[in-house]
Image: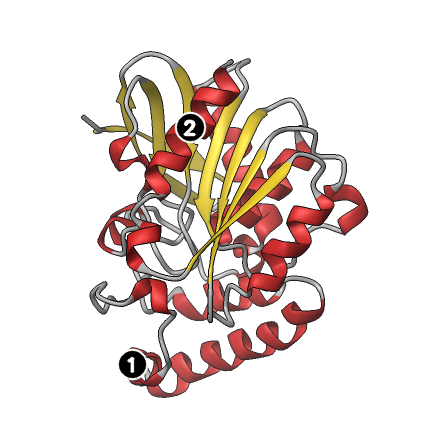
Amino acid sequence: MSLPAPPFPVPGAVLDTEFSDEGGAPVVQLHGLTSSRARDRVLDLDLGVGLSGTRLLRYDARGHGRSTGRDVPDDYRWTSLARDLLALLDDRFPGESVHGVGPSMGSATLLHASLMDPGRFRGLTLMLPPTAWETRRARAGEYRALADLVESQGLNALLARDAEAPRPPATLGTPETRPDVHDSLLPSVYRGAALSDLPDPARLALIDVPVTLLAWTEDPVHPLSTAEALRDILPHATLSVASSPAEVAAWPQVLAADVARAGR
């Protein structure tokens, strides 16, 4: 059972956390852009839901969910979020290597953190890697446009735009949700994402731990091309691709197997 854990202060924010202590391996779970641990549960992206026999730490990134933040785009760069993550791990799992799991922005945060502190992670389960490198340039422009839209027309204009966008086949049946970010912070969150990219491929090739990549089809925000590139770059990576909700429903079992493997 997950219980609220002490909030954790970082420069310019306070992170809201929860912890499930069943002994065993330490695991940290992240979430995606404009989401939160609560919203990811609604979207069936909470892979820790069936995880047992671990010490599972979940938290909301700065400015997201129940965590606080400020109206500063640089705060939401992936490198800034990686520093938050490492500081939190130093506090909650001092001196231990952990298994990291998270979708989209969470997976990007984990990759940056893995390079900042190579000994910190024993394995990674990276869901829905976001646009990167060549595809990131166009996506960055879209994020800046979304920030402008929210500032000029409000959140309802953003929700109307999102409602018209096609959905990946693997997400059919999941409910419509709102960004779990306060309206006043949403433009800065988008602009921080626009300033972000994955590390250079040559640096990523130095990540010497097992990595499982979980992707799905027909999603321009999380293109299969990024997951395929990471599979080829990372020295110990495997890739699994879902095209239906039933296949996504099996992802918690993938995480459980990854954690067990890392423990061995």
Residue 90 in view: no
For the residues labelled 2 and 1, the Cα–Cα distance comes to 35 Å
Q: Residue 163: give its label.
A: 1
Q: Disc 1 residue type?
A: Ala
- Give the answer, above or below, for where 114 lies relative to 220: above
In the image, what residue occupies the spot 52% across and 30% down? 87
Q: Look at 37% across and 81% down and name the residue there.
A: 165
**Residue at image point 27% right, 24% down:** 20
- The answer to whether mark 2 and mark 1 are in CB contact below 8 A is no
What's the colour scheme? secondary structure
In the structure shown, which secondary structural element does the residue marked by tag 2 occupy? helix
98 and 88: which one is in front? 98
- Quarter of the figure with residue 21: top left
Q: How many marks?
A: 2
**Residue sitting nearer the eye, 238 or 27:** 238
- Whether 166 is drawn above or below 22: the answer is below
Q: Which comes before the other along the chain, label 2 or label 1?
A: 1
Q: Is residue 142 visible?
A: yes
Q: Any mark on residue 243, and which?
A: none
Lateral position of residue 59 relative to residue 216, left or right: left
Most foreground residue, 109 or 79: 109
Query: Where is residue 24 drawn, in percent x and y?
Result: 37, 13
In the drawing, what numbered circle is on residue 257? 2
Q: Nearer the viewer, residue 157 or 198?
A: 198
Q: Position of residue 35 (x, y in %)?
A: 35, 56
Q: Secondary structure at mark 1?
A: helix
Please tell me which residue is depicted at 28% across the width and 47% down the height of the picture.
66
What type is the residue that disc 2 sits on?
Ala
